Image (tube, helix red, strand yellow):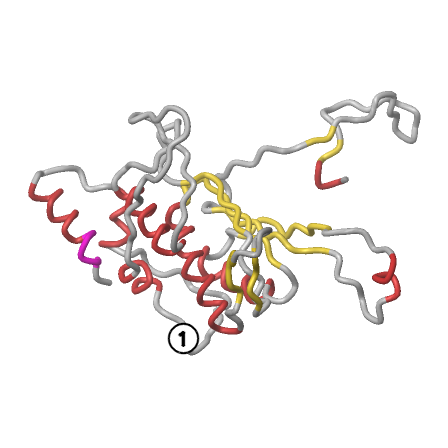
Amino acid sequence: MQLDGELKRELIARIEKNERIPETFKNLLFPPKEEPKEIELKYGIKEREEDILADTMAMPFQPVMQFGKISDEDWNNMLISGDNLQALKFLLKLKYDGKLKNKDGTEGVKLVYIDPPFATTQDFSGRNGEKAYSDKLSGAEFVEFLRKRLIFLREILSDNGSIYIHLDEKRSHYVKVVLDEVFRSGKFQREIIWRIGWISGYKSKASNWIRNHDVILYYTKNPNDFIFNKQYIKYPKGYKRRDGVEPEGEGYPIEDT
């Protein structure tokens, strides 16, 4: 694999100044031996991971507006507008530079949630009729579009980071295979069923099974070391179990409601 020009110049500059080489350069300079893939999705326009990471152009962020106080020492939240692939490449560069850090000193992003286009082949507009985004990609083009971004998201995740991918029934089965390939064996944690509405009216008379849920796929960077804060809903006042005993604990697990 070849480093792109920007990263190569940065590496040379660090060596000439006798500066510490960031740990995250290790995988670029000395790629780990590729783990065997149990399943791999093959299609004509699929690019090598090494080429995607090296050839994607980074787009440096330009501040347009600021809210509140900005700290030079701590991380400042950002709302980024632009090409998300180029933005991800720049975020990865920030991680290489040691500038994408958490308060505990760990590098990278601890949590990612994405709700990508669902390959509907439609254009979508905002409330005032302005064009919001185009969802015209389908088939292999859609799969490769998403795969490129998932590769960068994997790289910017912290070692104990997690990622959630929201999908519908059209492409979730393809994306699951892509995720297994990108994140490697053992990183899949859960498939979450997200109910999207109530069945009533004309829907209840449909001539086929009614679509009533989306899927959220949950993966982690590390199969065993990751952050998961269990969520509960408090028991209603006066609630008792079927045996008449008041329950102990924090409440219902949120996935049980």
Foreground residue, 58 or 99? Answer: 58
**Prevailing secondary structure class for the magenta stretch in the rendered image:** helix
Foreground residue, 257 or 203? Answer: 203
Tag 1: residue type?
Ile
Q: Is residue 245 above or below residue 125?
A: above
Find out whether residue 5 is within the magenta segment.
yes
Foreground residue, 74 or 220? Answer: 74
Locate the C terminus and report the quarter of the image it occupies: top right
Q: Position of residue 142 (x, y in %)?
A: 49, 68
Q: Is residue 225 above or below residue 250?
A: below
Boundaries of the magenta span: 3-7
Locate the N terminus and report the quarter of the image it occupies: bottom left
Helix, strand or loop at label 1? It is: loop
Q: Position of residue 175 (x, y in %)?
A: 54, 63
Q: Residue at x 35, y 63 (%)?
A: 49
Dot 1 crowding, Cα within 10 Å, few <14, some 14–19, many 20+: few
Find out whether residue 4 is within the magenta segment.
yes
Residue at the front extreme? 128
Q: How many numbered badges does the structure rendering display?
A: 1
Say which residue label 1 marks.
45
Residue 201 lies left or right of residue 81; in this view the side is right
Q: Position of residue 63 (x, y in %)?
A: 32, 39
Q: Quadrant of residue 100?
A: top left
Q: Residue at x 69, y 52 (%)?
A: 193
Q: Position of residue 220 (x, y in %)?
A: 50, 46
